[in-house]
């Protein structure tokens, strides 16, 4: 499986979760996303 890395702000992450709550594959990816500190 190809992996993609994106950088999101906390607001972007929440917006994606809100907008795509009916898309299980996106929600799975978002739930598995790891927070990286600068």
Image: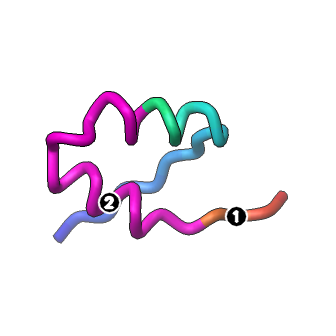
CA neighbours of label 1 inside 10 A, class few (<14), some (14 to 19), many (20+):
few
How far apart are the alpha carbons under marks 2 and 1?
15 Å
- Indicate left or right for 33 with 1 as reference: right
Q: How many marks?
A: 2
Q: Position of residue 9 (x, y in %)?
A: 65, 38
Q: Which mark is residue 29?
A: 2
Q: Which mark is residue 28?
A: none
Q: Residue furthest right?
A: 38
- The segment highlighted magenta reads 16-34
- Indicate left or right for 23 with 27 as reference: left
Q: Position of residue 27 (x, y in %)?
A: 28, 53
Q: Residue 30 colored magenta? A: yes
* Relative to 38, residue 17 above or below: above
Q: Which quadrant is home to the N terminus?
A: bottom left
| Prevalent SS, magenta region | helix
Which residue is drawn at the image coordinates 39% and 41% (left, top)? 17
Q: Quadrant of residue 31?
A: bottom left
* Relative to 3, residue 21 above or below: above
């Amino acid at each position: 499986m190809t992996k993609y890395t994106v950088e999101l702000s906390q607001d972007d992450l929440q917006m994606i979760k809100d907008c795509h709550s009916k898309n299980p594959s996106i929600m799975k990816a978002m739930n598995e996303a790891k927070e990286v500190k600068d």
